[in-house]
Amino acid sequence: MRIIGLDFGQKTIGVAVSDPLGLTAQGITTIRRKNFRYDLEEVKKIFDEYNAELIVIGLPKNMNGTIGPSGEMAQDFGKRLVELFNPKIEFWDERLTTVAAHRAMLEADLSRNKRKKIVDKIAAIFILQGYLDRLASNN
């Protein structure tokens, strides 16, 4: 069972995919956003290419647990994906995933320029891996 993980941002969408057993997440691409139609079609292509069963979208929440404008945009994107091709969607609390992604890249000694190019893909890995780890611990 393949699962797609998305880090939905204002300018880009980081994308990760699980291995066929649903144990590990690998970053695959960063979609440079153009407009909703393009963004939705790009996600659908990846979903179809990997024959995925589920999309996990990072849900940005405020530190107090409330959902702000970024979270509402992510929820709207999920709703539009359902309207386009009806995938199963789950949201994952992504608080601090971008911070964790930056920390991991700093520890790997990546240049600022390289970090900027892959931070969303790394954040998508953290989102999806968190979801996969929860699934594994529930079984």
Image: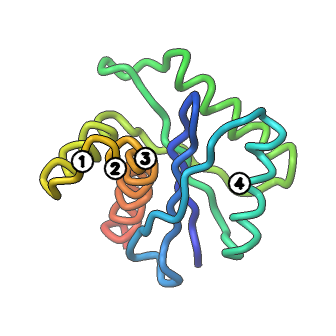
Q: Quadrant of residue 137?
A: bottom left
Q: Horizontal placement of 122 versus 17: left or right?
A: left
Which residue is painted at 46% across and 44% down in the image? 92
The mark nearer the N terminus, 1 or 3, is 1
Distance from disc 2 to disc 4, alpha carbons, whole Å, reads 23 Å
**Disc 1 target residue:** 111
Q: Secondary structure at mark 3?
A: helix
| Labelled pair 2, 3 in contact (Cβ < 8 Å) | yes
Which of the two labelled residues, at mark 4 and mark 1, occupies the earlier sequence position?
4
Label 2: few (<14), some or many (≥20) within 10 Å? few
Nearer to us of marks 2 and 4 is 2
Q: Amino acid at mark 2?
A: Lys
The answer to whether the residues at label 4 and label 3 have Cβ atoms under 8 Å apart is no
State how many labels appear.
4
Find the distance from the CA under tag 2 to the CA under tag 1: 5 Å
Q: Is residue 82 above or below residue 134?
A: above
From the image, tell me which residue sits under label 3: 117
In the drawing, does residue 28 fall left or right of residue 139?
Answer: right
Q: Amino acid at mark 4?
A: Val
Looking at marks 2 and 4 on the same chain, the residue that comes earlier in the sequence is marked by 4
Residue annotated with mark 4: 43
